[in-house]
Image: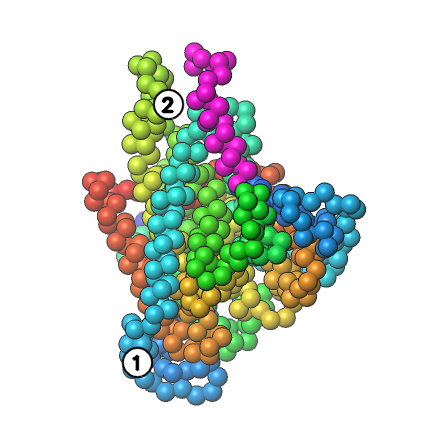
C-alpha cells in the first residue's frame, strides 16, 4: 500500500498539470515582469538596462501615490459604509425576512452577477450630465441637474459609489450565511430574557460574527487594492489621475504611454504590495483571534 | 416570537430599510431596462422613468445583430465550460497528490500553488501579452483558457483539498488492497464524494471568469474568440449617439448570467458563501 501511495511516476502525473499551469501563467510572467522592470523598453524595438531608475522614478511618481491613496479610500469606503450596511441588512433579513427572504437576497446580489462592462457603462449613463438618472433625481429635489459627476472633484466619489454599490450583495451574502450559522437557540434564550432587537444584534450577532467579519474585511482591503476594471471603463483614471488605481495605471503606462518597462516596474511593486497586505492582515487577525484559523 | 402578528413602528422601520436597500440595488437595472425599450429622443426627460410611446423592441434586434451577441455568447460558453472542467480536474488530481500521496515536497507544492490567490491578475497582463505574442497564442482560445484556469486553480485546489482531508482513508485503502490503481481510486471513489465542493469550485470559477474582460481585451484583437462583454465594449463606439440601442445591448449582455442566477440562485448562494469563507 505504501508503494502505491509513493509511486513517483503517478505523483508526477498528478501534480505536473497544476505546476505547469502555475509556472506558465503566474510565475513566469512575474519573473519576466521583474526582468523588464529594469529596462526602458517601450513595447517595440530594442531596450537598455537602466538599473533601478524605474523604481526610483516610481517612488516620486504622484500618480502612483494617488492610486495608493485611492485604494485606501476605497478600502475605507468598504469598511465604513458597505460592510456595516451589509451586516445590518443581513441581520434584518435573517430575523424579519420570512417569506420575502429569498426575494430580497436575490435582489441584493443581482448586481454582482452582471458584467463589470455593463455596470461601468450603466453608471456612466447614470452620471451623464444630459439625461443621467442622478441629475434627474437631483432635479426632483430642486437641484439644477447639470452636474458632471465624473468631472474633477466629484469623480473619485462617483467611482467609489459604483464600487460600493456593486460589491454590496457579495458582502451581504457572506454575512447572511454567517448569521444563518448562528445557533437559533441563542436568540430564543435572549428573547426569553427580554432582550430587544438592538441588544440581540450587539450582544449575540456581532460577537459571533467576528471571524466572518475578519475574513470579509481582509477580502475588502485586497479587492480595493486590486481594483481596475470598473475604473478602466468608467474614467480610465481621469480626470488627470484623480481616480487612478495601481492596476489601471500600470496598464495605461504600458499600452497608452508606451512605457512598457515602467509599467512592469509598477507591476512588480503592485505584486509586492498585494502579497504584503494579505500576509499582514492574516497575521493581525490570527494573533487577535489567538488561535489558528483553518 | 410572541408578537408575530402585531405591527410595531420598529417593524415598519425595519421593512423600510430592507426595501430601501433593495430599491437602491435594483433601480439602476430597472432604469436600464426601461431606457432600452424607449426611442432615443425620449431619453432627455425630467422624470426618472420613461413611458415609451412605442415600445422599441427593434432596439434589441439591432443590438443582437450588431453586437455579435450570438457569436460572443457561444465563445463565452465554450471558454467558461472548458475552464470549469479543467479547473475541476486539475484541482482533484493536485489535491489528491498533495494530501494523500507520500512524497517530500507535497505541502510545499500545494502552498506554492495556493500563493496564486494573492497575486493580482493585473500584474500578469503586461508580461503575458509579450509571452503570448512570442508563442503566437494571441487571438486563440488558449490566451483566455490558460490564465482563467491558472487564476481559478488556487481557490479550486484550496476548496477540494480541505474537503478531501475530511474524507476517511479506509475506503480507498481497502480498494488498494483489492488491487485498484490510483487513477481509478480518484475517478471512481474520490470524485463522487467531492461532489458538493466541486459544485462550489464550478460556481466560483464560472462567476469569476464569465464577466472577465480585461485579459480578453488585452490578448484578443479579432472577433474569433471574443467573449460576451465585448458586445458592450464594441457597441459604445459603433452607436455612440444612439443611446437606447446601447441600453439594449447592455441588457442583452447581462441577461444570460441573470437567468442562470435566478435559476440556480440557491446553489450559487451556497457556493459563494462556502467559497468566500474558505477562500
| Residue B112 shows up from this direction | no
How many numbered circles does the render carry? 2
Instruction: Say if A201 sits above or below B29 in the image.
Output: above
Mark 1 belongs to which subunit? Answer: A
Residue lying at 67% horizontally and 49% vertically, measured from the top left = B45
The quadrant in which residue A177 appears is: top left
Placement of the N terminus of chain B among the 4 image quadrants: top left
Which span of residues is magenta-colored? B1-24
SS assignment at label 1: helix
Residue lying at 56% horizontally and 55% vertically, measured from the top left = A146
Camera-side residue: B120 or B39?
B39
SS assignment at label 2: helix
| Residue B236 shows up from this direction | yes
Mark 2 belongs to which subunit? Answer: A
Camera-side residue: A230 or A32?
A230
Discs 1 and 2 carry the same chain letter? yes
Amino acid at each position: 500500500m505504501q508503494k502505491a501511495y509513493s509511486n513517483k511516476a503517478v505523483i508526477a502525473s498528478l501534480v505536473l498539470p497544476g505546476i505547469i499551469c502555475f509556472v506558465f501563467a503566474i510565475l513566469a510572467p512575474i519573473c519576466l515582469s521583474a526582468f523588464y522592470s529594469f529596462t526602458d523598453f517601450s513595447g517595440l524595438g530594442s531596450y537598455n538596462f537602466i538599473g533601478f531608475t524605474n523604481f526610483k522614478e516610481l517612488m516620486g511618481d504622484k500618480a502612483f501615490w494617488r492610486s495608493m491613496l485611492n485604494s485606501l479610500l476605497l478600502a475605507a469606503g468598504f469598511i465604513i459604509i458597505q460592510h456595516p450596511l451589509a451586516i445590518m441588512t443581513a441581520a434584518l433579513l435573517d430575523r424579519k425576512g420570512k417569506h420575502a427572504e429569498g426575494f430580497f437576497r436575490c435582489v441584493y446580489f443581482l448586481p454582482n452577477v452582471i458584467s463589470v462592462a455593463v455596470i461601468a457603462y450603466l453608471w456612466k449613463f447614470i452620471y451623464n450630465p444630459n439625461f443621467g438618472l442622478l441629475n434627474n433625481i437631483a432635479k426632483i429635489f430642486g437641484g439644477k441637474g447639470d452636474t458632471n459627476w465624473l468631472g474633477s472633484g466629484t469623480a473619485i466619489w462617483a467611482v467609489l459609489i459604483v464600487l460600493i454599490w456593486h460589491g454590496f450583495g457579495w458582502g451581504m451574502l457572506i454575512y447572511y450565511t454567517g448569521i444563518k450559522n448562528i445557533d437559533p437557540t441563542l436568540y430564543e434564550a435572549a428573547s426569553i430574557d427580554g432582550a430587544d432587537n438592538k441588544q440581540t444584534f450587539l450582544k449575540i450577532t456581532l460577537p459571533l460574527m467576528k471571524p466572518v467579519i475578519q475574513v470579509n474585511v481582509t477580502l475588502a482591503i485586497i479587492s480595493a487594492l486590486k481594483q481596475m476594471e470598473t475604473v478602466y471603463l468608467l474614467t480610465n483614471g481621469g480626470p488627470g489621475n484623480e481616480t487612478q488605481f495601481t492596476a489601471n495605471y500600470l496598464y495605461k503606462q504600458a499600452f497608452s504611454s508606451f512605457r512598457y518597462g515602467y509599467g512592469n516596474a509598477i507591476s512588480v511593486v503592485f505584486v509586492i504590495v498585494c502579497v504584503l497586505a494579505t500576509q499582514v492582515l492574516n497575521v493581525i487577525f490570527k494573533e487577535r483571534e489567538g488561535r489558528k484559523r483553518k | 416570537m410572541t408578537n408575530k402578528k402585531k405591527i410595531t413602528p420598529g417593524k415598519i422601520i425595519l421593512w423600510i430599510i430592507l426595501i430601501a436597500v433593495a430599491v437602491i440595488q435594483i433601480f439602476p437595472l430597472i432604469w436600464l431596462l426601461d431606457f432600452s425599450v424607449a426611442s432615443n429622443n425620449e431619453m432627455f426627460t425630467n422624470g426618472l422613468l420613461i413611458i415609451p410611446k412605442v415600445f422599441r423592441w427593434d432596439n434589441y434586434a439591432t443590438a443582437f445583430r450588431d453586437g455579435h451577441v450570438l457569436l460572443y455568447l457561444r465563445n463565452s460558453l465554450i471558454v467558461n465550460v472548458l475552464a470549469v472542467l479543467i479547473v475541476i480536474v486539475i484541482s482533484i488530481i493536485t489535491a489528491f497528490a498533495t494530501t494523500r500521496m507520500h512524497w517530500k515536497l507535497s505541502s510545499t507544492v500545494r502552498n506554492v500553488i495556493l500563493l496564486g490567490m494573492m497575486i493580482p491578475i493585473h500584474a500578469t497582463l503586461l508580461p503575458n501579452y509579450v509571452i503570448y505574442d512570442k508563442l503566437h497564442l494571441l487571438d486563440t482560445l488558449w490566451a483566455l483558457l490558460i490564465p482563467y484556469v491558472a487564476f481559478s486553480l488556487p481557490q479550486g485546489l484550496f476548496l477540494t483539498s480541505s474537503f478531501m482531508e475530511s474524507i476517511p482513508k479506509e475506503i480507498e485503502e481497502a480498494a488498494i488492497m483489492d488491487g485498484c490503481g490510483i487513477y481509478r481510486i480518484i475517478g471512481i471513489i474520490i470524485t463522487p464524494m467531492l461532489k458538493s465542493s466541486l459544485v462550489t469550485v464550478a460556481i466560483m470559477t464560472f462567476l469569476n471568469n464569465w464577466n472577465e474582460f480585461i485579459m480578453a481585451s488585452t490578448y484578443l484583437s479579432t472577433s474569433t474568440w471574443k467573449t460576451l462583454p465585448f458586445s458592450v465594449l464594441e457597441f459604445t463606439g459603433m452607436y455612440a449617439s444612439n443611446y437606447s440601442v446601447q441600453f439594449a445591448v447592455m441588457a442583452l449582455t447581462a441577461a444570460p448570467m441573470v437567468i442562470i442566477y435566478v435559476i440556480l440562485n440557491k446553489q450559487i448562494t451556497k457556493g459563494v458563501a462556502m467559497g468566500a469563507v474558505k477562500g
